[in-house]
């Protein structure tokens, strides 16, 4: 077992160096400025800690970790290398502890030296006036300076104190050491039995549980009250950052509301909490300011999108990457009805018919069914050609469909006014009244949009939840599991699939209409592929198939980036990394639905959506696939024993 | 499994007939529309024959590049049954790396030297692009796909989408939004004239290089021990591993081969389009995937011919249909939909489905 510890120190150091190198290339140190070095060292320490902890648990013979990060099955009882679970907590022999610390130190020194050498090379190149690479010349000096901890001017004048490089090495060595100490300390027997055990018995006590539950339920209300207090004129608790802090608190309050609902006992208590929470959230549009309201409005528009996409992806298991098409159809339908004068073709047509194009044809609420219907028809039209497609083919075709719709919006200048967009779309009213007149000025225009978004997404969520529990919902679920079996049990595949597409599209159409009236002016670039990706990311991060998860996902993915202004360019990279990491670590999402949790955790289930192939072909594939999985798992386990 | 299959067919007979009817009607309508369009508009324009020939040659060049990328999709799909959604980005990174290598050799004046120097430099540029793509492809497999090998099918696909976005926007953050322009050396910037048809040198070079690379790949797969191991793994992973084939190594090598071809394609596409930027791999990636599906995914000669056919259709299509060239992407995607309706296993048959049977 010793080779596991002795090996891999340099490799860990190299991996961390590569990761830090990536961060430097995308310009993170430059952003962090003076605190770049400590923060990067902290990142490195975290990584070392994760790796060392894993190595240590490997030594202890707890190969039984079934699943885990890689999902590879552990050792089976009776095979060599297997240790029973009781042995897993045995005290760590001093030798392994020392080795772990040595390994941490080595990895830290490796990273530190590499960083120092590279920054020295760059600094001296910049100092001597050599151009490294025309494109990189803009990025590198700032970041290298931040990494060394000097000003860019000092680098270009070649006056970096040499001790700075030593400091870099020291920082990363310390990171490795601290990580190793932390990893070993958690494993030392004494610590585990005394402190941790005492803490865990305490955490297990009835009283503590009750208190925690109570606090959890109370938290969103306290936060809402705090937000309201911050809104009182004259109260300034956070100075110039107050707007942002308040937005963050709003996001946290709404998110913690979802957890409070989970904590409450089902039945009367849950209903009361839900009612109170609904009342609390409904007051938000009245107390937030224009900016916060506009962000929250967007968040809830995306909740509607997510709920709709969830029907297609989460319930029916059809991966749709062109979902933005229906969003665009809803938005443009309402735009044509509300601002016919912006579209050359429609205004000509109306003039020809003797109707003045200067006024909206329909109001928001009367246009709603039209937008929903148009989107639903779009959904069915997309659905028909892709009825037979398998999961991954479907994804690509729908992606193409989304792009086609965008290309049409861009190039059909006569109808959509091309890249100049449709302008002056009207906002929703209430029986012909502007929001200010019935709220006596309490409701700003964005607040009204937020309120409409809240109510609409509540309706959509209600419909989605009821659908999931309905006969149709069970048909979707059966279809997702296995189309042939579902068909054999009497599910009408064509109707069921088309209904999923149509209902999902309807919700997207509603969201699109609200989005158009929120934006007032819409352009084809509002409907790029990223809307689809955002919607998909939020349901995946939140938890596919779970409405609460979708709200949480929307808060986190659409709301948080607004709070973290200035890191906007890193948003997509962070999302993308998050998608990959979520798939590896927690494919069911943060707040998974009960069904999904079962489904994803069992590796033998395949959520494939087979086409028209014969059943026995699929069966055979399943069997060989499983055999192959077992074989490769065994091989991997065997390799794990020899060391990486 | 025979009884359950029979029941499935018996119960689903209504659903399937209706579905088939709908699909056929949909496809037939589109076909009639296309034929009507071509005969009344496209051919009525009266373009000279040389116009069609030079368009077709353009299409073949583009098709050759698509073929290299499509082979990557097909190889990976054949072995792992997953769509490597980030493959277009692997190609783009090859293009970006090739751009820097080109800049490097221009700064040293290699591009103005005697012709052997220029040819050697061009080869080096391509090798550099291929190396960068291989590096990214292997990292992708290790970090984003290997941990998910046992997961349900949608999971690696979503991970691949994430990886694709990650690569695109990392390149955006590192190298900026603005396109990097490839400056052709004087040696290959001209062209030759055959009658009324003008053939640019770059086009000819790209076409023949891609054919050469495809032949090399075909040789590796059909004639070497490594190729035999790859085919064995594609056929049956478990049995191959029992026969002593290192499955993990074969998968990594498959990614390497696919990525190397994509890197070469990226460099050549850079010379062809004269620019490369962070999202220039996305649409060609989709097109190449379309090409792989067109030829039958998992089928190596299928991917090559599918790509050439797609390139031809894309080059000739807009003029034949009499529509603006902005819609050439629409034509490619519509073709994908049509193919999937009428022949889901592709024009040359999906090797995959034979294997499953």
Image: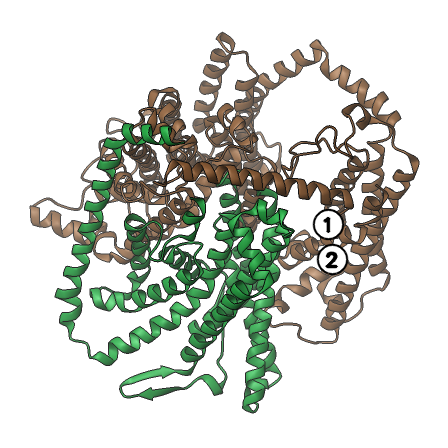
Q: Which residue is mark 2?
A: A147
Q: Residue at x 49, y 37 (%)?
A: A622
Measured as percent of width and height from the top left, residue A630 is found at: 61, 38
Direction bottom: furthest residue: B114
Q: Residue at x 12, y 45 (%)?
A: A356
Q: Image check: A127 left or right of B267?
A: right
Measured as percent of width and height from the top left, residue B46 is found at: 15, 75
Q: Find residue A40 and name its label.
A: 1
Q: Earlier in the sequence, mark 2 or mark 1?
A: 1
How many numbered marks have been drawn onto this rendered protein structure? 2
Measured as percent of width and height from the top left, residue B145 is found at: 57, 47
Name the subunit of mark 2. Answer: A
Q: Quadrant of the C terminus of chain B?
A: top left
Q: Up-down: is B258 above or below A635?
A: below
Q: Image check: B289 left or right of A368?
A: right
**What SS does tag 2 mark?**
helix
Separation (CA) of disc 2 from disc 1: 9 Å
Disc 2 vs disc 1: Cβ atoms closer than 8 Å?
Answer: yes
Residue A577 at least partly seen:
no
Tell me the shade of chain A: brown
């Amino acid at each position: 077992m010793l080779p596991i510890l002795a090996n891999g120190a340099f490799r860990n150091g190299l991996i961390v160096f590569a990761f830090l190198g990536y961060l430097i290339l995308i310009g993170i140190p430059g952003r962090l400025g003076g605190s770049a070095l400590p923060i990067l060292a902290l990142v490195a320490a975290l990584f070392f800690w994760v790796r060392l902890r894993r190595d240590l648990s490997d030594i202890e013979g707890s190969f039984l970790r079934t699943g885990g990060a890689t999902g590879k099955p552990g050792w089976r009882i009776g095979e060599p290398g297997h240790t029973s679970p009781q042995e897993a907590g045995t005290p760590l022999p001093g030798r392994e502890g020392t080795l772990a610390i040595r390994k941490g130190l080595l990895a830290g020194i490796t990273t530190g030296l590499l960083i120092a050498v590279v920054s020295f090379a760059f600094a001296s190149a910049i100092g001597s006036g050599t151009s490294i690479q025309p494109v990189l010349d803009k990025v590198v000096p700032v970041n290298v300076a931040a990494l060394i901890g000097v000003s860019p001017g000092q680098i270009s004048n070649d006056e970096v104190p040499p001790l700075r490089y030593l400091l870099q090495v020291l920082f990363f060595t310390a990171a490795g050491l601290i990580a190793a100490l932390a990893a070993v300390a958690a494993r030392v027997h004494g610590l585990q039995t005394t402190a941790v055990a005492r803490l865990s018995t305490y955490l297990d006590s009835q009283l503590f549980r009750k208190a925690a539950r109570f606090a959890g339920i109370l938290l969103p209300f306290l936060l809402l009250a705090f937000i309201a207090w911050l809104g009182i004129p004259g109260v300034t608790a956070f100075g110039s950052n107050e707007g942002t802090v308040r937005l963050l608190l709003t996001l946290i309050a709404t998110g913690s509301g979802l957890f409070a609902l989970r904590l409450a006992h089902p039945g009367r208590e849950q209903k009361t909490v839900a009612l109170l929470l609904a009342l609390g959230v409904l007051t938000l549009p009245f107390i937030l300011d224009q900016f916060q309201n506009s962000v929250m409005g967007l968040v809830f528009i995306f909740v509607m999108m997510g709920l709709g996409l969830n029907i297609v992806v989460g319930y029916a298991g059809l991966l749709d990457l062109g979902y933005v098409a229906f969003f665009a159809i809803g938005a443009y339908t309402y735009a044509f009805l509300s601002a016919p004068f912006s579209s050359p073709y429609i205004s000509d047509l109306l003039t020809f018919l003797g109707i003045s194009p200067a006024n909206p044809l329909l109001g928001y609420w009367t246009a709603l069914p039209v937008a929903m219907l148009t989107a639903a028809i779009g959904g069915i039209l997309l659905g028909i050609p892709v009825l037979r497609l398998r999961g991954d083919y479907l994804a690509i075709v729908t992606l193409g469909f989304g792009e086609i719709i965008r290309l049409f919006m861009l190039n059909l200048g006569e109808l959509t006014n091309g890249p100049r967009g449709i302008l002056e779309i009207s906002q929703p009213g209430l029986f012909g009244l502007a929001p200010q007149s019935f709220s006596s000025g309490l409701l700003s225009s964005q607040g009204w949009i937020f309120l409409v978004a809240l109510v609409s997404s509540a309706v959509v969520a209600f419909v989605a939840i009821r659908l999931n529990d309905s006969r149709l919902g069970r048909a979707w679920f059966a279809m997702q599991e296995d189309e042939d079996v579902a068909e054999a049990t009497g599910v009408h595949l064509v109707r069921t699939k088309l209904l999923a597409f149509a209902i999902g599209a309807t919700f997207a159409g509603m969201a699109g209409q609200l989005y158009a009236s929120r934006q007032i002016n819409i352009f084809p670039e509002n409907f790029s592929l990223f809307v689809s990706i955002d919607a998909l990311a939020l349901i995946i991060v939140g938890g596919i198939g779970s409405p609460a998860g979708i709200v949480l996902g929307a808060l986190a993915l659409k709301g948080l980036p607004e709070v973290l202004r200035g890191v906007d360019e890193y948003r997509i990279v962070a999302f993308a990394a998050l998608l990959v990491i979520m798939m590896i670590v927690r494919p069911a999402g943060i707040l998974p639905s009960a069904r999904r949790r079962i489904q994803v955790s069992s590796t033998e289930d395949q959520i494939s959506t087979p086409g028209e192939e014969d059943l026995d072909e699929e069966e055979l594939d399943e069997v060989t696939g499983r055999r192959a999985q077992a074989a490769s798992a065994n091989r991997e386990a065997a390799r794990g024993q020899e060391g990486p | 499994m025979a009884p359950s299959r029979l029941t499935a067919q018996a119960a689903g007979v209504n659903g399937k007939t209706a579905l088939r009817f709908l699909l056929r009607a949909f496809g037939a309508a589109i076909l009639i529309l296309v034929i009507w369009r071509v005969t009344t508009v496209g051919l009525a324009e009266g373009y000279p024959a040389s116009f069609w020939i030079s368009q077709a040659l353009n299409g073949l060049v583009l098709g050759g590049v698509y073929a290299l990328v499509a082979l990557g999709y097909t190889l990976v799909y054949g072995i792992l049954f997953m769509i490597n959604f980030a493959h277009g980005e692997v190609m783009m990174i090859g293009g970006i790396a090739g751009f820097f290598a080109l800049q490097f050799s221009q700064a040293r004046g290699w591009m103005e030297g005697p012709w052997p120097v220029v040819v050697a430099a061009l080869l080096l540029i391509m090798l550099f692009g291929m190396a960068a793509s291989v590096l990214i492809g292997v990292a992708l497999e290790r970090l984003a796909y290997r941990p998910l090998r046992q997961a349900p099918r949608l999971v690696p696909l979503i991970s691949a989408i994430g990886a694709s976005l990650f690569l695109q926007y990392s390149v955006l953050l590192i190298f900026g939004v603005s396109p990097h322009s490839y400056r052709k050396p004087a040696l290959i910037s001209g062209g030759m004239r055959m009658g009324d048809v003008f053939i640019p040198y770059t086009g000819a070079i790209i076409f023949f290089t891609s054919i050469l690379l495809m032949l090399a790949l075909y040789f590796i797969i059909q004639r070497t021990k490594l190729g035999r191991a790859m085919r064995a793994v594609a056929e049956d992973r478990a049995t191959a591993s029992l026969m002593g084939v290192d499955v993990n190594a074969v998968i990594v090598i498959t990614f390497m081969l696919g990525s190397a071809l994509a890197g070469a394609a990226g460099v050549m596409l850079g010379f062809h389009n004269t620019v490369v930027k962070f999202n220039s791999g996305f649409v060609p990636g989709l097109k190449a995937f379309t090409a792989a599906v067109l030829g039958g995914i998992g089928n190596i000669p299928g991917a090559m011919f599918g790509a050439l056919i797609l390139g031809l259709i894309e080059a000739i299509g807009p003029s034949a249909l009499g529509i603006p060239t902005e819609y050439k992407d629409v034509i490619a995607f519509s073709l994908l939909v049509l193919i999937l309706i009428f022949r889901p296993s592709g024009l040359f048959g999906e090797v995959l489905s034979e294997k499953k049977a």
